[in-house]
Amino acid sequence: MPKLNKLARIIKLKEKYPDIPWIAHFSDPWVDNILAIKLPMANMFLKKWEKIVIEKADKITFTTPETIDLVFRKYSKEFKQKAIYMPHCFDKSLYSRHIEK
């Protein structure tokens, strides 16, 4: 999750320039992360900001299809159309040195 002050600026820019596409990225779920400590006040803020991003972003990338399903289960189906699956990956050709086992 980005710092909230940066996120607030991104949202203001999106409101000022609505024709410029905003692609948000969720590597890990904000609200539904089973590994995160659930502090009531923090969770309240995360729910609010996640909803704003889901509503205002033009596209939203996720690293797994399961995360897409997890996050969008609480939103209307129209928002799930914004989701793009983009796995973590790397290009082996960028690593020229081979390490023998």
Image (cartoon, rainbow, N blue to C red):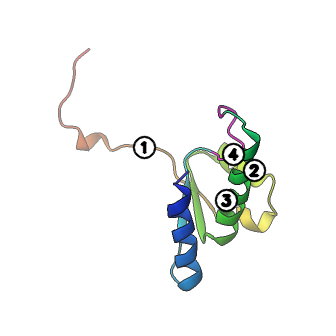
CB atoms at circles 4 and 3 under 8 Å apart?
Answer: no
Q: Secondary structure at mark 3?
A: helix
Disc assigned to residue 44: 2
Disc assigned to residue 89: 1
Disc assigned to residue 30: none
Q: Nearer the viewer, residue 7 or 74?
A: 7
Which of marks 2 and 3 precedes in the sequence? 2
CB atoms at circles 3 and 2 under 8 Å apart?
Answer: no
The picture places residue 16, in percent across and down from the top left corner, at 55, 84
Seen at 69% across and 45% down, the residue is: 42
Q: Which residues are magenta?
A: 29-36
Q: Which residue is mark 3?
A: 49
Residue 30 magenta-drawn? yes
Q: Amino acid at mark 1?
A: Cys
Q: Amino acid at mark 3?
A: Trp
Seen at 52% across and 52% down, the residue is: 86
Which of marks 3 and 1 precedes in the sequence? 3
Viewer-nearest of discs 4 and 3: 4
Q: Amino acid at mark 2?
A: Met
Q: Which residue is mark 4?
A: 42
Q: Nearer the viewer, residue 97 or 74?
A: 74
Within 10 angstroms of label 2, few (less than 14), some, or many (20 or more) residues?
A: few
Q: Tally the marks.
A: 4
